[in-house]
Structure formats: C-alpha cells, structure tokens
Image: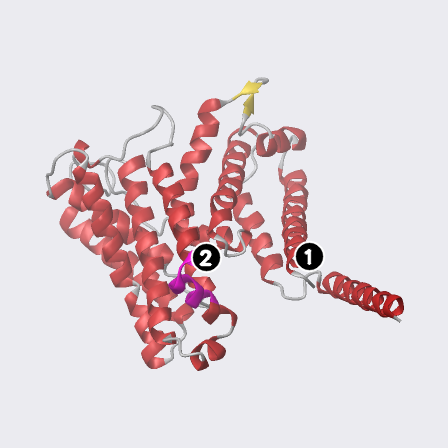
Amino acid sequence: MNKNNLKGFEFFRGLVAILIAIAVAFIFIFICADDPAQALSCLLIKPIISNGALNVKSILTILGRTTPTIFTGLAVCVMFSADQFNLGGEGVTMLGGFIAVLLGIYLPMAAGVHAAVAIIISAIAGGAVMLIPALVKVKLKSSEMVTSLMLNYIILYVVLHFLNNTFADRTKGSTQTYEFLETAKVGTVVQGTELTYGFFIALIATVIIAIFMYRTRWGYAIRMIGINGQFAQYSGLKVGTIIIASQIIGGVLSGMGGAIECLGRYTTFRWLELPGYGWTGVTVAILAKNNPIFVPLAALFIAYLNRGCELMAIYAGVPAEMLDIIQAIIFLFFAAEQFLSKTRQKLVVKEAKQEISAKADVKGENA
C-alpha cells in the first residue's frame, strides 16, 4: 500500500473508532438519561451553541482546556515515537504545577519574568525526574511502562506530604498552598473564561516539536528507533542516548504543561490527586497518530467531549464519567492491531492487482 493510501486508511480507521465510541456512548446515554434528546443536545450542540447563538464563553473555555493536554499529548508523541511506552507524564504534570506554584509564592520576581522562570524551572525538573525511568530502561533493561506508572504515585505522595506538612495554608478550609504572587500569574486572554496565554505557548510548542521530529537529525533518529530499534542500532545510532533524550523531552513538556495550567487557572496549588492530564495525553497522542501537528486538534476533540459531558451531568443527569468511557473505547480500538485488518488486507490486495495489471499492459504495449 502506497503512502497516501496508507494515510487515508489510517484516517478512516481512526474515524470509525471514534464513531464506534460515540455510538456506545449514545447507548449509555439512552440508558442513563431521563431525557436522551436533551442529553445528546448537551453533548453535541450546547458546548458551542446556546439559545440558538454561538456561546463564545464556552468555546473559549474549551480552547483553554486543551492547553495541558496539548503539552502531555506532545510529550507522549515524542516518547511513543521512540517506542517508549512511558506513562510518567501524569505525575510529572502534577510535580511541574507544584514546583511552579511554590516558586510563585516564595521567589518574588518582576512581572513578566516571574512566570517564565517558574515555568522553565518546572520544565527542567520534569525532565530531570523523567530521567529515572529512562535510565532504568537503558541501564537495567526494565520496562519503562512499569517504572513510570510507579513513579506517578511516588510523585503524588511526595507532593501530598510536602503540601500537607510544610506548605499548606492552615487558614483555609481545604488543603492548599498560600496564594502565589500576581507576578507569577499566566494571564487570561478573556476574563471569565479558562483561556490563558498558555494556549498560545502550547501552539508554539507544537510547531517546535513538529519541526524537531520531522526536520532534524535527532527527530529522525527518534522515529527510526520507534520503527526498528535493532536496525537503528546497526546503523550506528546511539540508541540508549536517544531513548533517554526522548523521555527527557517528554518530561520537560509535561512539567511545562503542569506549570502553565496551575499558574493560569488557579491561584493556589490544590491538586490532591493526580490531575488526569497525563492519561488524557495518551488518548490525544493516539488520536493524533503520534504526529505533533494533529495534537491540538485531538486535544480540542477531547476538550469538546469533556465540556459536553460536563453539561450532560448538569442538565441531563448523565454521569460525567461518560468521557472516560468514550476515551477508553477510542483507546481500545486504536490500540487493537486487528481492528479493520481485513479491510486493510483487501486494499493491499486490490492495489497489488492494479499494479500487476498496469505492468502487464505496459509490457503488452512494448511488445
């Protein structure tokens, strides 16, 4: 199958997986909702249209919610492209947010510089922490999936320990830090919405990662290892170094996403559990087929569904966990190697027959 046909098939395969996921969601909606029509309207229409007009506030809120998942989606894209099933972005996102808020509280700086420094330091910390599963993979040949999953919960409980015992504001009714300084705030584009300037930073990061992955020697090496690690090693590539680099980049992006999210949408650090952005980033990367350019679109799709499920929970009594069901089904069908494999085989056979026929016609003409 030629490259264009393969891309077309993969797009078709992804579309079918999404449609199946939404169809299953419809079944659950009809079972759970008192008014299924109202629930479907909340899921598909109300996120952007309210009372017959565009709901600009809701649209901007959806865009704002893509910010952290763009970063984690990009992180997963880089790591998955190197065939590294690292799931540590979840914990690193939380760590990045925690460090950024602490820097916002205890490190006074000038406006404009403060937020940038907090984000950069959080990104560096994220990359440093992601060294752990990377080094364990390269030096000890241990599964990066297992170590990164364990790392998530180590980060969670370390953060909660310091939050509860060292940095908590005891004057508040819930466990959270003191408010960070206004100079550390990532500004909101439109007041009253969740859209911050972090969204534009995420888009810039998307362009940078896309150029890195498809226009640089290092990006090519990462993708080559993902396609065939043994061939890459025989070709002289430093496979271990590149694997470590891919996971460090993933950590930097995840840490940056957590920092921007906390400094943009909150005034204190109040995450008492893993925020979920790392898990969603996996779904985003799968939807984007590990192509950074498509990550914002995939993140937008998930954010749209998130908003729709939120509205269903408010107005139609459908559990907000419906989004988790949809994501799980999408993940299932995208990860299933045999999903539509027969259709792909038929296309390959058809294309081969056409090529053989074309060559036979050329030989007949030459004769």
Residue 173 forms part of the magenta stretch? no
Label 1, residues with CA under 10 Å away: few <14, some 14-19, many ≥20: some
Q: Residue at x 38, y 49 (%)?
A: 208
* Magenta range: 213-223
Q: Report which residue position mark 2 lands on.
A: 214
Horizontal placement of 274 versus 269: left or right? right
> Does dot 1 land on a helix, a strand or a loop?
helix
Q: Residue at x 18, y 32 (%)?
A: 182
Say which quarter of the image contains residue 195: top left
Q: Position of residue 349 (x, y in %)?
A: 78, 67
Q: Main secondary structure of the magenta part?
A: helix
> What amino acid type is highlighted by mark number 2?
Tyr
* Cβ–Cβ under 8 Å for marks 2 and 1: no
Question: 234 above or below 288?
Answer: below
Residue 52, above or below 138: above
Identified at 47% across, 69% down, the residue is: 224
